[in-house]
Image: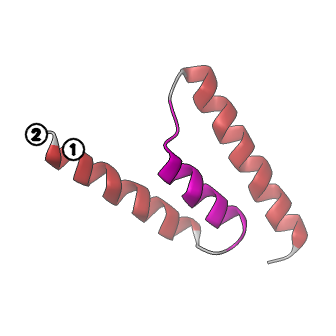
Amino acid sequence: MNSDIQLRRIEAVKLAYAINKIEGVPVSDYARRLYTRWASGEITGKEMKDALISTHRKYEESNN
């Protein structure tokens, strides 16, 4: 991954944190780790989204 893409991803993560903070939505440590891995190019956007969705589904199932 080139540095321009990585910098754009880092800015996207910062923006996502800011939006969540404005909305009062906490960001889990797990989500932060996934965002960091995505920004550095370790995982794809699809892998990040799939992991987050899977975690939310497991949480919902355990609370029903």
Quadrant of the drawing holding the N terminus:
bottom right
Q: In the shown orientation, is residue 47 left or right of residue 20?
A: left
Residue 29 falls inside the magenta stretch? yes
**Tag 2 and tag 1, C-beta contact below 8 Å:** yes
Badge 2 marks a residue whose secondary structure is: loop
| Residue occupying image coordinates x 77% and y 54% | 10
- Which residue bears the numbered disc 1? 60
Q: Tell me the amino acid under the disc marked 1.
A: Glu
Q: Which residues are magenta?
A: 26-41
Counting labels gives: 2
Query: Residue 20 or 33: which is nearer the viewer?
Result: 33
- Which residue bears the numbered disc 2? 64
Q: Position of residue 14 (x, y in %)?
A: 73, 42
Q: Tell me the amino acid under the disc marked 2.
A: Asn
Q: Position of residue 16 (x, y in %)?
A: 65, 40
Q: Quadrant of residue 60?
A: top left
Q: Quadrant of residue 40?
A: bottom right
Q: Between marks 2 and 1, how big is the CA–CA gap? A: 6 Å
Q: Is residue 7 above or below residue 29?
A: below
